[in-house]
Every structure is written in structure tokens, then in C-alpha cells.
Amino acid sequence: MVKHGIAYLDVEPNLIRETGFHKDRSKVSESLFSLSNEYMGVRGYFEEGCSGAATLRGNYVNGLYAYALKDEPTSYRGIETRTHFMVNTVDFLGIELWADGERLDLGTSSFSSFTRCLPFREGKLTRSFVWELRNGKKVKVSFERLLSLSHYHLCLQRVSLESKEEVSISLSFKTGNPLLTWGDHAYLHEKAREVEKGLLCYETENTEQMAYIASSLFGHGGVKAERKEIQGGFADEISFVLSSKAVFDKAVAVVTSRDEMKVDPREFAVGEASYGSTHFDELAEENAASYSAFYDDLGLEIKGNALDEQGLAFCLFQLHSTYRGLSGKDNLGAKGLTGEAYSGHAFWDTETYCLPFYLLNDPDAARSLLLYREKTLPLAKEKARKLDCRGAAYPIATLDGREGCTLFQHASLQLQPSTGVVYGFYHYEKTTGDFDFVLEHGARPILNVALFLLSRGGYAQDGRGFGFYGVMGPDEFKMMVNNNYYTNVMGRFAFEYCLRIMSALPESKRKALLAEEGASESDLEDMKKAAASMYLPVSKENPDLYEQDDSFFELPHVAIDSIPREQFPLYGHWSYDRLYRTDMIKQPDVLMYCFLFLSKMSQGVLRSNFDYYEPRCIHESSLSPSIHSILAAAIGEKEKAAGYFSFATRLDLDDYNNNTGEGLHLTSLAAAYLNVLYGFAGLRTDGDLLEIDPYLPDRYESYAINFLYRGRRLRLEVGKDCTRLALVEGKPLVCRVRGKETTIDGTLSI
Amino acid sequence: MVKHGIAYLDVEPNLIRETGFHKDRSKVSESLFSLSNEYMGVRGYFEEGCSGAATLRGNYVNGLYAYALKDEPTSYRGIETRTHFMVNTVDFLGIELWADGERLDLGTSSFSSFTRCLPFREGKLTRSFVWELRNGKKVKVSFERLLSLSHYHLCLQRVSLESKEEVSISLSFKTGNPLLTWGDHAYLHEKAREVEKGLLCYETENTEQMAYIASSLFGHGGVKAERKEIQGGFADEISFVLSSKAVFDKAVAVVTSRDEMKVDPREFAVGEASYGSTHFDELAEENAASYSAFYDDLGLEIKGNALDEQGLAFCLFQLHSTYRGLSGKDNLGAKGLTGEAYSGHAFWDTETYCLPFYLLNDPDAARSLLLYREKTLPLAKEKARKLDCRGAAYPIATLDGREGCTLFQHASLQLQPSTGVVYGFYHYEKTTGDFDFVLEHGARPILNVALFLLSRGGYAQDGRGFGFYGVMGPDEFKMMVNNNYYTNVMGRFAFEYCLRIMSALPESKRKALLAEEGASESDLEDMKKAAASMYLPVSKENPDLYEQDDSFFELPHVAIDSIPREQFPLYGHWSYDRLYRTDMIKQPDVLMYCFLFLSKMSQGVLRSNFDYYEPRCIHESSLSPSIHSILAAAIGEKEKAAGYFSFATRLDLDDYNNNTGEGLHLTSLAAAYLNVLYGFAGLRTDGDLLEIDPYLPDRYESYAINFLYRGRRLRLEVGKDCTRLALVEGKPLVCRVRGKETTIDGTLSI
């Protein structure tokens, strides 16, 4: 697999920086320099705009969404006809700047010394340059921007101007004007405007959500701005003669009806904005302290490969910024809050790709992700009803818990979001040891998933056992297949875990739960029977080789290396039906199962399946390469592991998929982290004991990382001469190190 | 399988008649009393309307169509995003009738002695009743309507009024006002209006077709009407005192730009209308002569079952009215010209269900249907290109030759329209003996279909041979299956027939054809190889039992009798994906192949497959029961044959599918005919010899029917005591009668 990146950022371990303006990469930069504090996200666009440069001016608030304006027609039942999506909000960072009658526009103005920089330990975006006016004067302009982690309703903005000569400055800080979603429709509608207070109120198109946006401007040195009503909102305007330096801080407070505040959200927004505009430095320091603590806890060190170190630090910066379980109401969108592609929807990546990062670093956030599935259970049940099934079918793509995908081939045929929820609770239990949480919050969702699977599957007529028919497994290049190995084996796992939970519940609780969910002991018997007779297709010649589905080994072969490069991505170049009838796969399927249960896989199984499926995979999913890298590492194929890893850490930084401009591949960013821990470090967290078996890839001189496991903090240091595992916090831990049961207490050379 | 009909028409062998107005069946009656002359069709609606009665006022012109107003969104390639459909034209039969200040409206007026009648040997619709005015006076009103077969641009209408007392009559004959298609949009737009000439000109919405509609009114006894411009058109109005009888004849001439006339189509239309309005009786007689000749040629007699006799005569009336190969530009829509459901589209029913009727009765019409496929070859090639394939892929649903289906699961996965075209030419050859026609007009389409199949199929990795992957066979309750038996075996047949044609062509012609189609001798070699290695799945236990596709015998079983009746049709009650994962089938698939090659099927094969698939079929296609009846007859299951036949002849007359109101199931009507000939009469026309092996079903005292075969006209008479096969016209014929090779010359008792 050959992918090509386009690198233009400076390589430093703890920040990203663009030196000199790369106008042709403007949308990519907007994505990379995005900020998020989970409550909201802003893309790294220029406050003042830039003529001639591609842009997606996006300000998003987590959970602020709308439904499509029209139904998609269908003659069939059980198919969603109306999707929903995260909406773009309003323009609250716009600035118009004039100097000696000249308007700032980096598309047309002369400038030098451009830098744009985002240091990960600060979480503050800065952009500065020297503006060279036509009259020969020079003004140093700098913009700073941050989303406060502590006061998470606040987006702060600072503008500093410096000049050695006198320059007539005119500045207008604008707030208002709904932004278009997907470039074609504004889904926020203004409901009220209080210009004096600096407050705008909006309602979403068809979801009855309110958004209150207040802004406040503070001029250092007592400079006062004049507030004016403008079309679509208001502006704070100032004209003055700059002779040395002038600094302005603007704060925007965003509050929505989702906050369910006890106080008046309007007053709160106005108060926060006022606080924010006068406390820029304090809030920036709080952000820096918080991000620093995060990196300190991570203890990440990579020596000998600055590209990877920067890439990994960037991935972790984005993950931590985007989700910490703030409100407990949200999930992680595939693009986070950095763009509109994928509609802001969360997928099953949440449990399979992102959850491990939180389990090993921020168990509170992990719990919050699982609670989201508990909260949205009623909507998953509704979906199961629409599919003529019992229990609960979790959506393949969602924001509010409803199915957001209108394609039956994904929404109705993919069962992995549902089994993924069960796996999420299971992995939580294994990693934290907190089975009580699973009993309390997981029993009901898991029972419902198992009921769904029981009604969705069936017994083959020919006696081969229970299985799932007419499904799409993780590999989205096969549709309506039978006995997809992943789906069947995950179904068995879901039944078994459900039975384990049901037997662990006190009898009265179990009975009550069954009754409440319209289930009975005989359903549990049926699950037991289905699990015991689950059909798992394997090769006749080699039982270690799992067959992706009933027909896979027969399908006509395509030599994927023979496909001309210009035909990728295949979705865009091949007739849709053509994607589905060969042995080419889009992404790991059997291998995905191997990844999820790594501790249980023999070398024979890993080797057989990797050797068979890896040459058949075209990785038309950004989630694919890292899984291949991890499995290659597990069978000692270090070169392949390195090859697949090579762009995992820099997928977006170097725009390997040529679509970073649409937003960051947020859930894929987690893969870089998985790759280091489960690949290079040989970590296994899906079994009863923590396992670790690290190696030092050729690309590094050494690497080190901390992680949490069952209440302990552990530190792994892997060097050329010495590899150490240390217990940093917590009680001694029995684990399996390099295949041997070992107790970790203090620091151990391994 | 239990279906229930609703019978309300009088049962007579040579006509349909409604005695007394059945207002609740109004839309069904509109469909049943539809007229067509292939050029156009009018539904049997009331000229004057009827308040409170459901109606679809439909006047259709064959080939007058439009594209949808908007694209259907898709992110994928190779899928049509815009369908096309037959449009409703304009209201040209409207009449407003007043008597003594009271307006005729059978929804509110008092009336008696209502009859509506369509005698098949006349092809003229009459409706009459006695209108009982509120002032006690009575007016006998009668409407007659016909579509001329000889002057096929003409729709004629006669109104007769009789009264014994003096009544002030006011009559308005209206022409104009575009009708809505699907009740929501008018796709004809008025371009010109010449009121004096009685001419209106329209253009179709987005297909640049012109329609010219002229009308002329003739009052018997020299009564003159006044022409007035009204909104949307014009009206011919007359007020007079009726004292005994008054008769008015209106003629409407419809001409379109599709006619490609050398004369001015406007003048022609005006001339035809004028001729029509003054020659009602002559034109009615010509129609009667033509329909009578058709029925005389058919020689159909059924004794002992008037229901079947009427039903069959009705089916044949509709087939003959709808298609005789008039223009050579059209195909047969699934609903003919009787409604808008199925968009006026033709399906693969044309070759598999309708063509045999024409082959055995009207070979000119049969040729015309095949020429349609030759003409539309360029569009079928275009479709193949969109599917990344070579050759030509015929559309699953079409009016103009383009794919009209926007669902990939049908349009991209169903290969049977393409193999159906090959079968059509093959069957033509077998039935007419005219191989030259096939060489001249079939070679190119067939070569292209074979090239398409060659590029669409592939060789299994496991060595089982060539096959088609990711298809939907005739059974539309399976999607994306591999090695569908029907598709594979028809693919083999298509390759073999293509090779036969290519070897029959003179070398220079073959070479030229191959070169023109971008093919080579090595393609023919590849076809030979693919045909020879075609994989055909069969049961391991019983090689006579064919497996519908690679997974069929394993699928979970559903006892179809256990499905509650209120869940039918399943499309309307089951989640879409649920239709696809059991062994329930929608319609014959393996059995369809058995039907198409009946002469080649052993009793073992017929019995094995019928016994296996028949209990699994729910017949959610109106084309299904007759095939089951024919096969039941072939294996001597006379009771089952009778059961499946019971509603074949009266599918629409008794509204078995509860949707006749939307239009007649025109292509299904052919099934009744197939059922008599291939079922009861045991006719086989797919082999080198005609075969016949008739029996007398219990339901009849006797039956008789004529048919054409290789230039002869034969007559079969099947009675209780005596069964005879007679050569009515043509040279002696060697055929296989009751299994024995026999020469027919004169009349033979068999």
C-alpha cells in the first residue's frame, strides 16, 4: 500500500507551526489548526478572511444539530428517510482591520514573517506577520485564539498591533450572521438581538434548540469600542492612531438550551463574555496548565523520530481537546468538531478505536462514552423495532442516538455498532476492573443488544448452526453476506457476555430487568444455545484461517496491485456494484476480530489470517492501516508494521488521504496511539491479565509512555539497551510480561 | 397460496359489462374499461366526472414521456439518478351536460338502468343510463368511445340523448388542460392554441417532444356547436331543446413529434379530427372487423367455464389492443397504457411473458418487440459503460431504452433483461424458423450482451469455474448473491447462442461485426471457455435439484404459511432487509429457467425443483402463479395447476392483487395465455420440434385454440372424448405429439 503525504509544517515535537503562508493548503491548515474544548470547536480560519484561498469558516457546538430539510424517498420499510447532522453556527470571530485606508487581506496585502503556531502544551493558536502597507509603513499583526477548558463556554481572541510609525487604524470585531452548513444552508435562525448587551439568540432549523451567543471586547489601556448594529448581528468598532502597540481581547460566550442551566442562559452568556474579555491571560494560563498536566501524565517520549513524536503528540492533543466526557451527552464525531464531513456522526469507531485511549488515560471520559450508549438505548430500541427485531440496534452513524444513515446497506445490515457497545463495556471491565459499573450501566444495553441479535440471526437449514444472514461486516466491500466471521463471533461474544452479566446480577435484579425488557429466562437459554451452536466458517485446509463469510474463499480474485492508482478512491471511480464481487476488501474484517481479542489469538491464527487478508485489503478506510500494523507487529513482521505505521501518526498532518481540508479524521487519530501501545509495546488489555511484550522499532532510539490500568499508573520505557516497566502509582500488579506472569512493584527491567 | 378476488362484472364470454354503477370500484372500472390502440390509451373514466368517486383521469400516448424533475442523490457511481416515465397528457374527453338547469353527475344525480359495456369483438366502450331529473323528466344518456385501430391517431366519442318530454339541454365538449401525472405535476405545457381550428400544441416537460391535439364536433341533424376559448383550451358548446333524440360525435386526433410526419402534423391532426367526427360509424365498423378477425384467428373456445373464457378473452383483448408493433418504436409497459404505476416501463416480462403470445399469434408484432431491443442497443451499451463493463446491459425498466430504475440492487445486479433479449431472439428462431432475422437483427445485440456477461462474470478462486457474483436473480428477495443458477445458466445459454450466431455469419460479416463492436476472436474463445466451465450449483444429495445460489440451501427456513395474512404484501409490512435473509422466495427463479426451457427438462428435474421451491414461494409478483401452474401441469399435478391457474385469467377482472385501480397488469395478462398453451395444452416451443401433450382440466368441458408455428396455423381442440390437432394453414409439420414424432397434415386425433 502506497500513500503519499504532503508535508509543509515545521517538525517540532510539541507544536505545529506553519512558517510562511501556504495559501494552497489553506483548508488543510484550517483543519489542522482547529481548536476544540469538547463544548465547541472552531476551525483555524483567518479572522479577517483571505481572498482567493479555499475556506470552510466553521464554528461548531457539540450537539447542536438539525435534520435534513427533506425526506429521501424510499418505497421500503425500516429505512431512515431523514438524516441529521451537526450544524455550522454563526460567525463570531470575524475581524475587519484597516490601516491607513488599506484593508488587511493576506490574499492581496503584502506581508512578511508569517507564522501560525499551535503549541500542544498551551492549546492556544497564534498567528503573526508583518503587514507591509502600500505607503511603506509596517504593522506587526498578531492574532491569538483559545477555547477555554475551564470556562468552556468561552472562545477568546486577542489582536495585537505594533508599529514604529503612526498608522490610522480602524478595527471592527463582528459577531453574528449564521454560517452555512455544507456551504448551502444556514440552520440557525436569529430569534432575538440585544445589541447593547452584546447578545444574539438563535434557534436551530427543526430541532428546537436555542443558542445564545454573547460577546464582549476589552481594549487594553482603556481604549473603548463603539457597538453598532450591523446586518445579521453587531460589531464593536474602534478607530485610533497606532503609535506603538495596541491590544484587544474579545470573548465570545456560547450557551445552548442543551446546557439546561438553572440560571438565565442569556445572563450567564453575557456574564461569561464579560469575564472572558478581561481575563485572557488567566484563562490562557489555566489552559496551559491543563494541557501540560495531560502531557505530563502521558509521559510520552519518542527519541530518534521527530516526525512521529510530533504526529503522536498532535493526535493526543486533538483527542484530549475533543472529548473528556464533559457533559455526558455527547459522543465523538468521526471528524470531531473540525468539519462537517460525516455530519458530525459518531460510528462504531468510538468503542473500537477511541475507547482504548480513554480507558488507558482518562477512565472518566471512557465511562462517559459508555453512558452515552446507555442514555441512547431507547432510540436504539426504536431502531430495532423498525427492523422488525427485538431489543436494541445501535445506529451505524449518529449524533443524538437516532440512526442518521439513510442507506439500508449500512444502517440495516451492519451489526457491529451493537456488538461494539458490548465490547466497549467488556473492555472497560477488563481495563479498569470495575465490573460494578458494567452491572449498573451495561446490563440493560447489553441485554437488549443480545435480544436484538437473537431475533436478527437464525439457524441454517443445513444444520451448520446459528448465524447472521444478510449482513455487512466491517469490510464494507461485501454486502448481504451470510455468516460473516466477525459478525458471528462477535454475536457469540455478545451472548456470552450478556449471560455472564445476567448470572452476576442478584436474582431479583435480573428478574426485574428481564421483565422490564420483555424478556425471559428462556431467552437466556436461547442465547446460550445460539452461542454454543454459533457457526464460524474456517478454511478446510487450515482451521486457523477464518473465512470472512460463507462465500469469501470462492470469490474471483483481484490483484489489487494491478489497479491503476488513479482509480483510487474506488468509491469515486468504480461502479458501485463492482466494489462488491471480488475478494478485495476495504478494511480489516477477520483481522478486526483478531485485534479486538489479541490476547486470545495464537500465532498460527494471527499468521494465517494476516497472510491471507493483508494482500487483499486496499485500506479505503483510514482506520485500516493501524490495525494491520498492530497485527504485523504481533507476528514479528516488524518491517510491515513499520510500513503501515509510517503515516498513522501523520495521517492529517501530511494529508495522506487528500481530504484533511474537510476536517480531521478524529477517530483515526486514535489509531496512532493504539499502534504504539498495542503494536510496538505489545500491550494486551482484553484478557484477565495485562500483557506486555514491547520491542523497539528501528525508527526509534527509544520511546516511553505512561498508561493507567486497574487503578495503577504504569510507565513503559523502551530503549536500545534497556527496557523498563515501572509502577508509578498504585498497588503492585500481577501481569504477563513477555509471556511470563510477573508482579510489577516499582521498576522492572523486562 | 390463497388470493381473494372481488367480482362485480357480468360474466359473459365476449365482453365485460358492469350492470348498475359500482361507485366504490370506480378506479378499478376505469382500468378494466380502458381502451388502447397501441398509439394511445384512455382509461374508462366518466366523461363528465363523478363527485365522490375515486378517479385517475388518464389519457396516455405511447412514448410520450418525461424525466423526473430532480436527481435522486447518490454518492456512488453507475447508478441512474434520474428516472423517466410515461406522462399523462391532456383532458380531451371532458363533457359538461346540463338538463333543465341540472348538471349531470352520477355522484349526485338520480339515475337508473346503468350499464357500462365493452364487447371484445367491437372494441367500443358504451355507457348508458336513464337520468332522472329532479323535475321528474327522464333523459336516456349514452356515451360511446373508441380508439380507432385503422386511424390510430383518433379517439372517438359519441353522446346520445333521448327524452320523451321536452328538456332544455346544454352541452359543452371540452378539450385541453394538462392532466397531472402521479397526481402531482403536469408534464405537458401548452405552446400554441388555435381555437378556430380546434388545435392545441404542447411540449413535454424536459424531453422536447411535441404533442398536437385537434378536436372536431359533429352534431347529427345539422346541429352546430359554438366554439369558445376556455381556461386551458377550448370547448364546443350547444344549447337546445331536446324533444326526442340528439346525437353528437366528437373526434380527437393526437399527433406527436415522435411520428416524424412528412406533412405538417398540425394540419394532419386537424384533418383527422374532422374526418373522425363525421365517420364514427365507419370507424367503429372497421374496429369491429379488426377485433373480430383477431378473435376468429385465435379460435378460442372454452366450454364449461364462462369465468375463464371471459377472463382469457379479456386478457387477449388487452394484449392485442396494446401492442401490435405499430410504430416499431415502443415496447410493452407493465401496465400498458392503462395507468401510471411502473412509470409505463417495460421490463424483462416482455421477452419472457409477452413475446410467446405474439410469436404464436402475431409474428410481426414479435419482430417489432425484438427490433426495439436492436434499436435501443446504443443505450444498453451506455449502461454497460456506466457499470464498468463491456458490451451492452439492457435496462431492468425502461421506456426510451435508457435505464429507468434508480435502485442499484435492481438496475445493476439483475442481468436477466440482457439474457432475456438473447432468449427472445432464440425463441423467435425456434417458433418462426426465421434464423435470417436473428442473424440480421440479433447478432449485434447478442454479441454485445455476451461481451457484457463476459466482463461482468468471473472465475472463482477455488476452481469451481465461471460464474456471476453479486447479482440479483429473478427472485427479488435475494440480493448480491453468487452463482445464481438462473443467471449462470442463462449466461451459458447466451454465450452458446452468441457463438452459434457468430459461426453462422459469413466470415466477412463476423469479422466486420467483431471489429465494429471492439471485440475479437479471442473474446469468442473466452465465451466458449466460460460457457464450458460455467458453474451450476446443484444439491449434493440430488443432482436434479438446482440450488438457487451458492447459499440458498443453508438459509434459515421460514414456514410461509405461518406469516399472518395481514403482513402481505411483505414489501409494505416488513423491514426491507428482512426480505432477504431466509429461504422464502418472491417469485420463480430456478423454476423460471425450467419454464423457459421446458422441452429440455426431465421429469426428475421438474419434480425435484418444483417440490423444493414451490412451498418456499410467496408469489409477491403477479408473474409468479402462472409459471407454477405450468410446471405443476408438466409434472401431472393437475390440482395444483388448477389452483395456481384459478386467478390467472381474472387477475385484474376480479382485482386479486387489490391494485387494479392503478392500471391493468398488462404483461401479467399474457400469463393466462401461456398457462393455457404451455400448461393445459402441454405446448413446447423452445426446442427444435414443436411438442404438444394436452389434457383437459377438470374445470372445462372442452377447449380449443389456434396458434401459428413456423408459418403454419394449427388448431387444437381438447374435449372429453376426443382431442384433435389440425393443420389449418400451411405445409405439413413434423412435431412431437404426446412424446412421439408425428407429421401433422390435416386433422389428427391425438
Image: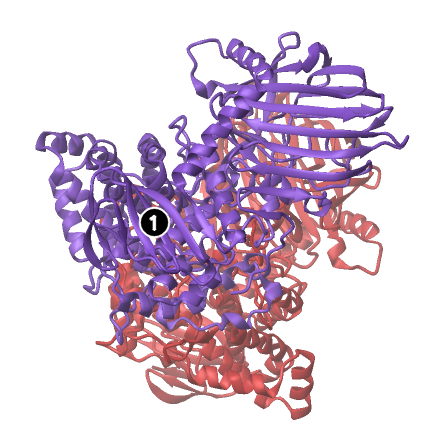
Chain colours: A purple, B red
Q: Is residue A500 left or right of residue A348?
A: left
Which residue is farthest right?
Answer: A135
Say which quarter of the image contains residue B740: bottom left
Q: Residue A577: x percent and y percent?
A: 50, 61
Up the image or down, A98 lies above or below B690; here it is above
Q: Quadrant of residue A389?
A: top left
The reply, left or right, for residue A465 in relation to residue A203 is left
Name the kind of residue labelled 1 in the image. Answer: Leu
Residue located at (79% from left, 31% from top): B229
Residue A5 rendering spot, x and y as whole percentages: 60, 56
Quarter of the rendering occupied by the N terminus of chain B = bottom left
Residue B580 pos. (x, y %): 35, 55
Q: Nearer the viewer, residue A601 or B153?
A: A601
Quarter occupied by the C terminus of chain B: bottom left
Q: In the displayed image of the protein, which residue is found farthest to the left?
A: A507
Judging by the rendered image, the residue that carries numbered circle 1 is: A716
